[in-house]
Amino acid sequence: MDFAFSDEQQAIRDTARRFASEHLAPSYRKREAEGMIGSAVTLGMGELGLIGTDLPEEYGGLGLDCVTTGIIIEEIAAADLNVSYVQLMGSLNGKILAEHAKPELASKVIGDLCAGKILTGLGLTEP
């Protein structure tokens, strides 16, 4: 088996790494102190196609595989673990919407999610 990244995966990794090193790492401490990520970061990620990459194309995702999505999460997390959750939660909640929401709602919400215009969250309780 060949576990090497494909050319496309390498290009996406390089894009995510460049974004992380130029836009995330230098301002990590500021975001951490303020306790917020900010729309400039999420919109920047959206412009580069770094959110919801594994979501269906018909809803605004890129339809990429989970390995490529994991590559993006790793590169973002290397600069700011908190920001990596933008992609992680986007993929998780976007997948739930893609599979269970009405198509009109899924298209609107997932499109905005992938563009970095909105964030999603997930609330869980323990018994």
Image (cartoon, grey):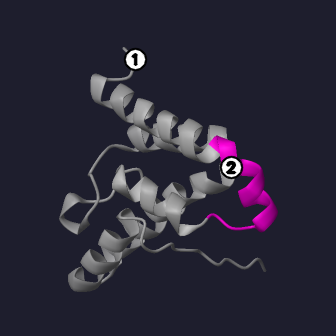
Question: Which marked residue is nearer to the observer: mark 2 or mark 1?
Answer: 2
The boundaries of the magenta stretch are 25-37
Q: Secondary structure at mark 1?
A: loop
- The image shows residue 84 at horizontal and vertical percentages of 58, 51
Task: Decide which of 106, 77 is in the foreground and name it.
Answer: 77
Q: Tag 1 or tag 2, which sits nearer the N-term?
A: 1
Indicate left or right for 26 with 112 as reference: right
Indicate left or right for 39 with 13 as reference: right
Residues marked 2 and 1 touching at CB (< 8 Å): no
Q: Amino acid at mark 1?
A: Ala
Q: Which mark is residue 27?
A: 2
- The image shows residue 52 at horizontal and vertical percentages of 39, 58
Q: Give residue 82's quadrant in the image.
A: bottom right
Indicate left or right for 106 with 88 as reference: left
**Disc 2/disc 1 C-alpha distance (Å):** 32 Å
- Give the residue at the far top of this rendering: 1
- The image shows residue 20 at horizontal and vertical percentages of 55, 41
Q: Give residue 114's quadrant in the image.
A: bottom left
Q: Is residue 106 above or below residue 25?
A: below
Residue located at (66% from left, 42% from top): 25
**Disc 1 crowd, CA 10 A, few/some/many (<14, 14-19, 20+):** few
Residue that badge 1 annotates: 4
Q: Amino acid at mark 2?
A: Ser
Task: Decide which of 86, 18 is in the foreground and name it.
Answer: 18
Secondary structure, magenta segment, majority class: helix
